[in-house]
Each structure stands twice: as structure tokens, then as C-alpha cells.
Image (tube, helix red, strand yellow):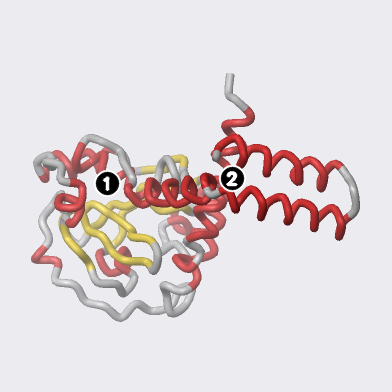
Amino acid sequence: MKNPMLEAVSLLLEKLFLIYNFKLFSASAQGEDGARSSFHDINSFHRGDVLEVSRTHLTHYGIYLGDNRVAHMMPDVLLALTDDKGLTKKVVSNKRLILGVIGKVASIRVDTVDDFAYGAKILVNHLDKSLRKKPLLNEEVARRAEKMLGTTTYSLLWNNCEHFVTYCRFDTAVSPQADKFCEILKIIIRDERSVLASALLGLASVVCLGLASYTALPAIFIPFCLWMAG
């Protein structure tokens, strides 16, 4: 049986992570479906390589499959609304991506290198150095990625594009980006000033909105949880 409290905390963490990295969806492209004037030398990529591109505060990852094809995990709300592959096969727009993150629906899909990069510079196998792990053979990496193609659940903290590529490449699904966010959040929670700030915000909400269950309970519960966790 699932713990409602753990689910609520997990949901809150994911939404905070989404807000923390919101520029990923709004400022990284010239337009929602705008042209991406970029050229990449695909001859320098090998099947099974991990490709990564910077998206403002986040890094997006994919596995190169050869023949100008990249497998990567992309949130997409259309997957929950239609079975029309003609629609879902199109490059995922910013709106589709944001709503897909909120709806926790995604797919591991194949796009061209330029569509994957969205105009950004591509780094190759950079995770090998940053994680200091021995990668699997490239062909095994590519085969794993191909077996996972299709619709999947999505979670910013527990199942994102970085989890996908690290599982394929290193046989261990990890996300240093999500871990870093959790560490920052842990520092904030442990700071006693957070308890005071949350208490003041709770008091302000009671004064502005009146004394009611939806104002009084958070005003008491949130500072208490921060105090106990601190």
C-alpha cells in the first residue's frame, strides 16, 4: 500500500524541480517550433555514444543509434491524448513538453541529431568522465536504448532522460542533476531561517485570506515539518 505522505512529498519535490528549471522550457529555444539552424558532423558520432546538450539550467541526454538517429526520453502530453502517431512523431513543442512533465507521461523516441540538439552544441560521452564509471560496449548501449523505445512514465526526480542514458550506458540509472537539486533543497530545509520564513508566510496567509483550514493547516504543518527535519 502506497504511503500518501511519501507521495505528497515526492509530488512537491518534482514540482519544485520543475519551477527551479523552468527556463529550460521557455528560454532555450527561439520559438516554440522555431527553426533550429545548426549543423553537426554526425560522422564524428559512433553508435552507442551518449550525446548531451545544454538547455539553460538542465542538460538533455540521448543515445546515438547511427544513421542520424538519437534515442532520448521526452515528456509529451499528446501521448495521453491521442494514438495518432502522425501527431506524436512531430518534434515536441515547449507546451507539449511542459504539460507532459506535469502529467508524468513521456516516450523514449527517435529524432534526428539536429532535432535532438535544438541548436545547442553537442558533447559526446561527457558522462564517462563526470561519473567516473566504466561504460558498457557501445553496441550493447545502443541495443538497450532500442529495446526501451516507446511510451513510459516520467518523473523529473526519479525517471528522466539522464536516468535513461545512464542505465543504457552504465547499467545503473542515476541522475546527478536531480541529486544536486535534492542536496540544495536539503540545505534549505536544514537552515533554521526556513522555519521562520515559512511561519511568517503562513501567518501572512491567515491574515490576508482569513482563518480557515486551507490556511491554518499549512501555516502550522509546514513550519513543524521543517523544524523536525532541521
From the top left corner, tell me how far across and down residue 209 is, in percent: 87, 56
What residue is rendered at 9% in x and 65% in y?
44
The kind of residue tagged 2 is Leu
| Closer to viewer: mark 1 or mark 2 | 2
What residue is rendered at 30% in x and 67% in y?
117
Asked whether 222 or 2 is in front, the reply is 222
From the top left corner, tell me how far across and down residue 179 is, in percent: 38, 46
The secondary structure type at the circle numbered 1 is helix
What residue is rendered at 80% in x and 58% in y?
204
Asked whether 86 or 167 is in front, the reply is 167
In the drawing, what numbered circle is on residue 71? none
From the top left corner, tell me how far across and down residue 36 is, in percent: 34, 77
Residue 223 visible in rendering = yes
The secondary structure type at the circle numbered 2 is helix
Q: Which quarter shows the C terminus?
A: top right
- What residue is pinned by disc 1? 165
From the top left corner, tell me how far across and down residue 184 is, in percent: 44, 52
Relative to 60, is 1 on the left or the right?
right
Residue contact at pointers 1 and 2, CB within 8 angstroms: no
Residues at marks 1 and 2, CA–CA distance in whole angstroms? 25 Å
The kind of residue tagged 1 is Val
Q: Quarter of the image holding residue 67?
A: bottom left
Asked whether 206 or 105 is in front, the reply is 206
How many numbered circles does the render carry?
A: 2
In the drawing, what numbered circle is on residue 12? 2
